[in-house]
Amino acid sequence: MRKRLRQIFVIGLALSLLGIGVPAWSEDDPRSCNDQLPAGTPSYVVCRWMATPEEALEIAAFWLNDDGQNMIDSGPPDRLEFTCDQPGDQCPTDSEGDGEIHDVGAPDVPGAEDGGTPECQNGEQCYVDGHGISAADRAAAEKTPAGQATQAGAQTGMRVWIETELADDYKAGTLQEAAKKVAALAATQPGVVGIRFSSQLGYNQTFTTADEIDKFVTEATTALHTLVPGKKLAVHTVVPALGCGGNDACKTEMTKKYPLLDPERVGAWLTSGLIDQLSLDSGRLATEYATWQIDAAEAQRNQSIEVRARAWDAYGQIAYEDASFATAGTAQLTEEQATKAISDRIAMPLQEDAAETVTLWSRWQNDQGQVSRVYGEKWAASTTWDQLKKLGTIRPRLATIYDPANPEVDVATDLKNLSEVFGQVYLHAA
């Protein structure tokens, strides 16, 4: 509970800069601690003491009275104390380390001064290498736009993901080759968090059956885990039924319209351990539910409640994704519009505790070649961008997608500017 309260408090501080808030909630409960919640806490966030302050004082007194004798008595009997400072003590001298006491935070490996990367003994690599990825594979990956951006992105302080699409390769029978290429990108830089290997999974027309999707997810994750063990894996999709809430007619229609996007089936990718992150698109929330008089705000709230009820965050990370901040051409949101958009599409998902991160498309191009941006062209001034910069406290929870093959100016400039708002970046690899 304390962790959740701290998360909500930090978010509240940042969002208060924009005047964003939601009604508080209270309950006539003797164990309620809702009065400890910050102003603007949403109504469904509930605080309840496991031990009231008075009870906590009694518990502390029990263990601390009489110089903590109760604590001492609770320990294992006949404890063996061996300090190596008494005559006759014999302690090993061949264990790891240099035998010296170091200050907290001080480097204990030569070459790790000032937070740098320690030099490895005998020149070996200091990080887990990919299995089956050769030096030639990594060298080739480093020369690609995504490979160069991976190295540049790590220097900005952003957490870097590799974003690609393996579904088409799976259909073409070339999954292993494609997985090896993207795994080589992830292996070129130790700081790469993971790989997002599919987008709009089940929503687009790539697959025709749910079993085929499950097979793809299983084979893709198996291949990637083998090639780059330890890297996180993610997919992006949309689950329209979640926006219906308790409206059974809506659920029936959404299930019929999107048969491949059953919530239980999608959730199983998380609960079975196949993926570590599930990104849910919010692009359909504004229009999909008009038949049942469910507006965008209610649809999003329904989705958040459904996600929490399924405890998906106990198995992996949930991200919300939104492309609607970016506007085409020179059109820009006003300050009022930008503030409302931030409140509705960033503040609410985080305050509802359904998503750990929110991914914004900061720049994208449609089939006609028209470019939409959150910031101004060539990084010209933008009201929306200025408002997003005010969310510095929750920067680690904000992510974006970047295509290094189509930069706004150049990769270094673009990533530096993006790092002013976002704590994570998905680098697109063709």
Image (cartoon, rainbow, N blue to C red):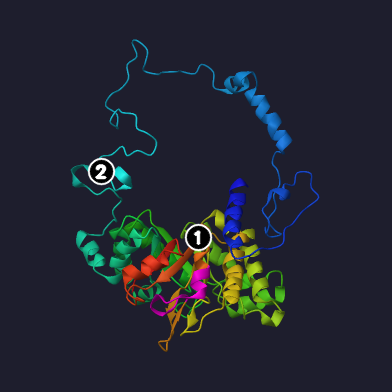
Q: Is residue 181 visible?
A: no
Horizontal placement of 355 versus 160: left or right?
A: right
Q: Which mark is residue 111?
A: 2
Q: Is residue 313 above or below residue 285?
A: above
Q: Secondary structure at mark 1?
A: helix
Q: Which mark is residue 42?
A: none
Name which residue type carries label 2.
Answer: Gly
Give percent across and percent down for residue 320.
Answer: 54, 67
Give percent across and percent down for residue 309.
Answer: 64, 59
Rate crowding at label 1 as few (under 14), some (14 to 19) or many (20 or more) other CA atoms within 10 Å: some
Q: Is residue 388 visible?
A: yes
Magenta stretch in the rendered image: 374-387
Splitting the image into 4 quarters, where does residue 311 fall? Answer: bottom right
Give percent across and percent down for residue 155.
Answer: 33, 59
Q: Secondary structure at mark 2?
A: loop
**In which quadrant is the C terminus drawn?**
bottom left
Horizontal placement of 369 versus 69: left or right?
A: left
Give percent across and percent down for residue 271.
Answer: 53, 57
Task: Decide which of tag 2 and tag 1 comes sooner along the chain.
Answer: 2
User: On the image, numbered disc 1 is attached to which residue?
Assistant: 392
Residue drawn at (46%, 18%), measured in percent from left and top?
Answer: 80
- Between 223 and 275, the one lying in front of the other is 275
For the residues labelled 2 and 1, the Cα–Cα distance comes to 32 Å
Residue reaching furthest front?
Answer: 381
Name which residue type carries label 1.
Answer: Gly
Residue drawn at (71%, 77%), measured in percent from left and top?
Answer: 249
Q: Tell whether position 418 is magenta.
A: no
Closer to the camera: disc 2 or disc 1?
A: 1
Q: Is residue 294 above or below residue 346?
A: below
Q: Is residue 5 above or below residue 164?
A: above
Rate crowding at label 2 as few (under 14), some (14 to 19) or many (20 or more) other CA atoms within 10 Å: few
Residue reaching furthest right?
Answer: 28
